Amino acid sequence: MTTLGCIVLPSEPPSRFLPIARAADESGLEEVWLWEDCFRETGAGAAGAILGATSRVRVGIGVLPVPLRNVALTAMEIATLEGMFPGRYMPGIGHGVLDWMGQVGARAASPLTLLREYATALRALLAGERLTVTGRYVNLTDVALDWPPSTVPAVLSAGQGPKTLRLVGEVADGVVITADTGLAGLQAANELIAEGREAAGRAGDPFRTVVFVPGATGPDAVERLRRAAADWPIDVDTDEKLAGYAVWGDAEQLAAGVRRFAEAGADTVVIQPTPDTPDLEAFARFLGEEVRPLLG
């Protein structure tokens, strides 16, 4: 069964996060996803608040930028939230926006090396291992978590370019696919990830594909989606082209769009509202109460 979620956009002020997340929780959506965008809300802080204010919804981060964060701190945050809310926190990591990383003096000369070192160390720390690592970017001396999670959470990673996608297959437990990837890009990404998993001898390990998909409802849905996609390096000037990247319409139409992405290889489809969605709580409820039941 396809998992359905929604995104709380970081363009919303922090005061708006809990009402939207509560609407998702109450409506039956399985997941709420957050971004850690510079220089807006912190991912772990927002996730902790949402987890404490809701009863069942899982909270994912898509994603924590690794140049910005020491791996031991990220492991501590994940272990804390997993210990307090078992099975409800889904951490994701990634390169981060390189220009933003440059603004804070954290831009890595080799983002791939950093991601490899970081993901490897993070998964080991969460598994309760004691690490001494001397890497190009990750350096730890006799570090172990005092309270490692009793159930090790999966660590997901974002990926877009071919090298990163292969690396994600090697070192992560799942992938977060961005909203400008589309159906064809999703299928190509899964092939690259499979190559990485095969190369690392992990082809049989559990792996989860999370896809962000722009979505809208209402009479102006297509116009809002096109405005949201204006800065993407894609052409969505026809409805047919837009349907390769987004879903819109009534509940039946959105459910059909979600199925298209599931058939292309998504385990989880996370609907990304347009920044000008008029009522985000109502949109989250619409997804949970009307679209979710149609997915079986």
Image (cartoon, rainbow, N blue to C red):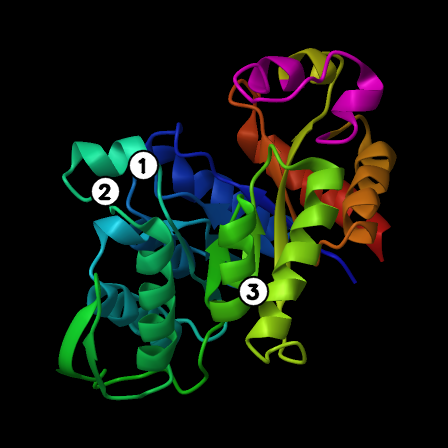
Any part of residue 28 in sight = no
Q: Is residue 231 left or right of residue 263?
A: left
**Mark 1 → mark 2, Cα distance in angstroms:** 6 Å
The segment highlighted magenta reads: 225-246
Tell me, yes or no, whether the two marked residues, 3 and 1, touch with CB atoms within 8 Å.
no
Q: Amino acid at mark 3?
A: Gly
**Mark 3 → mark 1, Cα distance in angstroms:** 22 Å
- Where residue 136 appears, x then y in whole percent? 21, 63
Q: Main secondary structure of the magenta part?
A: loop
- Where residue 187 appears, x then y in whole percent? 74, 48
Tell me, yes or no, whether the two marked residues, 1 and 2, touch with CB atoms within 8 Å.
yes
Q: Amino acid at mark 2?
A: Arg
Instruction: Name the residue at 31% across, 55% down.
Output: 44
**Mark 3 → mark 2, Cα distance in angstroms:** 23 Å
Instruction: Identify residue for label 3.
Output: 169
Any magenta on residue 232? yes
